[in-house]
Amino acid sequence: MSILHTVNKSPFERNALDSCLKFATDGSAVLLFEDGVYAALKGTAVEPHVSDALGRLKVYVLGPDLQARGFSAERIIEGISVVDYAGFVDLAAENGKVQAWL
Amino acid sequence: MSDTIEVEGKEYGVDEEGYLANLNDWVPGVATVMAAQDNIELTDEHWDIINFLREYYEEYQIAPAVRVLTKAVGKKLGKDKGNSKYLYSLFPYGPAKQACRFAGLPKPTGCV
Amino acid sequence: MSEVVKKFMYLNRKAPYGTIYAWEALEVVLIGAAFDQDVSVMFLDDGVYQLTKGQDTKAIGMKNFSPTFRTLGDYEVKKIYVDRASLEARGLTQEDLVEIAWEDFETEEEIENIVEVIDSARVGELMNESDAIFSF
């Protein structure tokens, strides 16, 4: 069964994103939320790492958390999809299992 | 202090120090009732300060400490009002604390 | 108020909203401002995210304390520093940050923006020069 991986910590503060990208198998879904949304932004030191992963993983970012932190959808890396809370729930339901990288 | 106050037939929740529990519940009657409990009848001068505080909170999301309030009132309403003697004459229990309570704001940051 | 003025630095290294640190730090700065010390506020690492423009927390149901930074000038905090390397690593520039004005009510002297972006070496020097560092 497929897994939805969630990352809610900033990639600059913790290695949660690193670990997630290392262990998530091809075709898995990754949702960035809370402070994890900073990994979705263009022009950061972690962008190359996230862009590489887009080739084999589906990456999503939670819109309300992005908005709360002052960033619009134009600032995110191409290939990452913005979802709302309902979209988050759909992802969790579709994937059956959720792994939270804390 | 009771945990609710009655204003125009409606009950409003307050905390243990008498501050309104929910900022968005505020209606002018809240200020009138709270002032009456403190034996104050609100005048236009009181309302100037109460409205000023609500605008300040709306813009900056905090209730100002008393010295910040004094300076900011001086700038907005004139130097004759931006001094603690004037503000204490209106709000004897402390311009920031008492006026913020009437205005439905939380206790000012930096007040103990 | 007190005879000896000390240099207090508040060092912020956490992003807003994900944890409570950023808001707590800001409250401590505002409360501490009553003690008339020489206060500086430093933003490093993820702390730089606290100052981004255009924050809107309606949809996450949390208090948006971004506008509160603009009162730091009223509280007589005159020195706000941001580490340039931390901004660059996050793809940000000073353009992305809020502006904080400062005004002396007596003399009406005004500074349009007290937020200063500085090099890492300068961050280290300022830390060394402080009498006390409060870390969040």
Image (tube, helix red, strand yellow):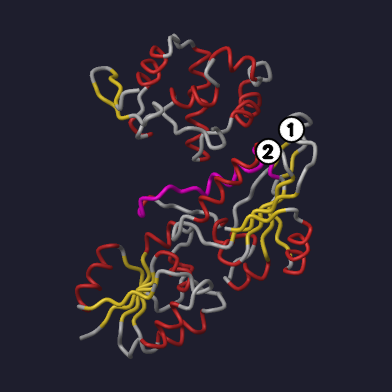
Residue at disc 1, secondary structure: loop
Under mark 1, the amino acid is Met
Letter of the chain that mark 1 sits on in the rendering: C
Which residues fall within the magenta stretch?
C59-77
Q: Residue at x 45, y 33 (%)?
A: B106
Residue A101 found in image quarter: bottom left
Question: Along the line of sight, which residue is nearer the eye, A47 or A2?
Answer: A2
Magenta-drawn stretch contains C80? no
Magenta-drawn stretch contains C65? yes
Residue B12 found in image quarter: top left
Under mark 2, the amino acid is Phe
Q: Residue at x 36, y 54 (%)?
A: C60
Q: How many marks?
A: 2
Residue at disc 2, secondary structure: helix
Q: CA distance from mark 2 to mark 1?
A: 7 Å
- Dot placed on the residue nearer the N-terminal end, 2 or 1: 1
Question: Along the line of sight, which residue is nearer the eye, C129 or A92?
Answer: C129
Residue C135 found in image quarter: bottom right
Residue A47 coordinates in the image, percent (x, y): 51, 79
Q: Are the residues tagged 2 and 1 within 8 Å (C-beta)?
A: yes
Q: Is residue A4 left or right of residue C20?
A: left
Mark 2, residues whose alpha carbon is within 10 Å: few (<14), some, or many (≥20)?
Answer: few
Locate the C terminus of chain C by quadrant.
bottom right
Q: Which residue is mark 2?
A: C35
Q: Which residue is mark 1?
A: C1
Query: Where is B112 relative to C131, above or below?
Result: above
Residue A54 coordinates in the image, percent (x, y): 40, 84
Mark 1, residues whose alpha carbon is within 10 Å: few (<14), some, or many (≥20)?
Answer: few
Locate the N terminus of chain C by quadrant.
top right
Which label number is shown at residue A88?
Answer: none
Residue C18 coordinates in the image, percent (x, y): 44, 61
